[in-house]
Amino acid sequence: MSSSVASAQMPTPRPTIPGTRYHRIRKTVQTICVSIFILLPLFDIMRVDIVRQRFYFFGAELWISEFAILFLTMMFFWILVAAMAMIYGRFWCGYLCPQMIFSEASVASEQFISRWVKKHLTFASETTRSVIARAAFYLLGVPPSIFFAFVFVSYFVPPVDLFHRLMSLDLSTAGGIVGASVTAITFFDFAFLRQGFCISICPYGYLQNMLADKHTLLVHFHDPNHQCINCAKCVKACPMGIDIRKGTHQLECTHCAECVDACSAVLGKINRATVIDYGWGDSAGSTEEDRRWYRRIGLRDGKRVVILALLLIYAIGLSVVISLREPVLVRIMPNRMTLYTLSSDGLVHNQFRIVVSNRSHTQKQLTLALDGLPQGRILAAGAPLLLAPGQTVQSEFDVVAPEGALQPGVNHMRILASVPAQETGAFDETFIAPMDSAPAEKSAPGRPNGKS
C-alpha cells in the first residue's frame, strides 16, 4: 500500500527536453563559425593573397612556388569534407555552412522587421506596412552586405589595401570592381536567394547522398507506436520548409534538427517522447551496442576508423612538412654562358646567379661562404645580404681563385648559405679553370677566356 502511495506521489519524469535543445547548440556553433570566418583573413590565419601570390595557413606564409604543400593542404580539406559527409551526414550544412548561417539570419531579420512595422504602424494599411517593411529590410541589408563582402574579398586581397579602396569608393581598379560585384551578389543572396542556393546550386547535398551508407548520421521520423499528433510543428520549424515525416533521404534536409526541437517541445508537454531525432543510418532504433562511446561519436565500423586514422596521419604529416619548411629559400645556379674569365691579377672568375626569398615575417640576413676550393673566395656586392619580410632578391656573384692553385678543368667546391636560426644550406657546385697548365694570356678584367 505504502509503495503504491509513494509511486503515486512521485512525479512522472519528462521524457524529452522541451524545445531549443539542438537550436541553442546550433546557434552557439554558428556564432563561433561567423567569428572565425571574420577573423581568419584579418589576421592572416588562412588567406590566399592573389596580389602577392601567397597562401597564409595558420602562421605559415606559403608561396605559390610551393605547389606541393598547397596541393596537399587542399586535398586534406577535400578529404575532410568527404569524410564528414559520410560519417556525420549534412552536419556541415546545418551547423557550419556560411550560406545557411547567413540565410537564416536574413530570414530572421526580415521577420523581425515585418513584426515591428505591423506593431508600430497600425495606422497604415496592410499593403503600406508590407511595402515599408520590405523597403526597410532592403535598406538595412546593405551594410551587412558590404561588411561580409569585404570579409570575403579579404581572403584574396590584403585587408588594409581593400579597406582603402572601400573608403575611396574605388570602382576603376580590378580590386574595386571585384569588391563592388561581390557586394551586389551578397545583397542578392541575403535578399532573394537564401536557402534556394542550397536546393538548386550547391552540390554538397548530392555529394552527401552519394557518400552516405547504413551508418551515416541522419534525422529520422520514427513512430512505430503512432505517437505523432499531426500538429505540423516540425514543418513550420523547418528552415527548408520540408516535411520530415515524408522520408529521411530528402535532398533539401540539412539535418539542422529544428524539427527535433519542435516535436520535443510539443510531445514533451504531454509526457511523450519525440518521434523525430538523430539516428545512425536508416534504422532509428538504439541497442546496447549503440550506447558505447565510440559508436556514439560515429566510429561504427572499420571503414570509419581507417578513414579517421588516415586523416589524423595526413594532418600530422602536413603539420610536420609546414613546420620543417625553411623560412629563407636559397637557390644558387652557375652562369655557364661564360665558363670562366681571367683577370689581370691572375685570378680565375666563375659567375653564379642567386635567388633568395624571405618567406618569414621578420628581416633575415644571408651570408655566403666557400668550402673545398683552394684559396677561393666569394666576391659579392652588398654582402651580407639583408632581406625584408616577403622580399625576393636576384643577383649575381663571382667565385674567384688563383689560377696556380687550381686543377686544370673542373674543380669541385661547396657554397654555404648561412641564415641565423636556420640550418646552413650547402650547394655542391663546380668551378671551371683553364685546361692548359701553362700561363694563359691575361685578359682585361671581366673578359672571357673560356666559352661554352
Image (cartoon, helix red, strand yellow):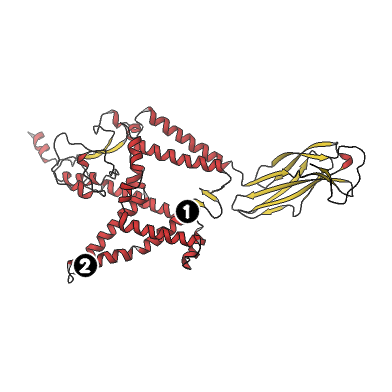
Residue 263, by quadrant, is top left
Query: Height in image: 257 above or below 390?
Result: above
Find the residue positioned furthest to the bottom.
123
Question: In the rendered image, which residue does mark 1 sit on?
Answer: 155
Q: Is residue 235 left or right of residue 435?
A: left
Query: Height in image: 314 above or below 353?
Result: above
Query: Height in image: 21 above or below 189?
Result: above
Question: In the rendered image, which residue does mark 2 sit on?
Answer: 129
Find the residue positioned furthest to the left.
1
Residue 213, by quadrant, is top left
Secondary element at image label 2? helix
Q: Amino acid at mark 1?
A: Tyr
Residue 413's spot in the image, x, y percent?
A: 77, 38
Question: Foreground residue, 125 or 413?
Answer: 125
Kindly identify the residue that appears in the image at 24 percent across and 34 percent down.
284
Q: Is residue 341 left or right of residue 130?
A: right
Query: What quarter of the picture does the N terminus occupy?
Result: top left
Secondary element at image label 1? loop
Q: Amino acid at mark 2?
A: Arg
Residue 106's spot in the image, x, y percent?
A: 31, 57
Residue 357's spot in the image, x, y percent?
A: 64, 49
Question: Foreground residue, 343 or 443?
Answer: 443
Q: Label 1: few (<14), some or many (≥20) within 10 Å?
A: many
Question: Foreground residue, 297 or 95?
Answer: 95
Query: Height in image: 189 above or below 206?
Result: below
Would residue 53 be visible to someone looking at this image?
yes
- All told, the count of numbered labels is 2
Would residue 322 be visible to someone looking at this image?
no
Q: CA distance from mark 2 to mark 1?
A: 40 Å
Kindly identify the residue that appears in the image at 14 percent across and 39 percent down.
227
Kindly identify the residue that appears in the image at 34 percent across and 47 percent down.
201
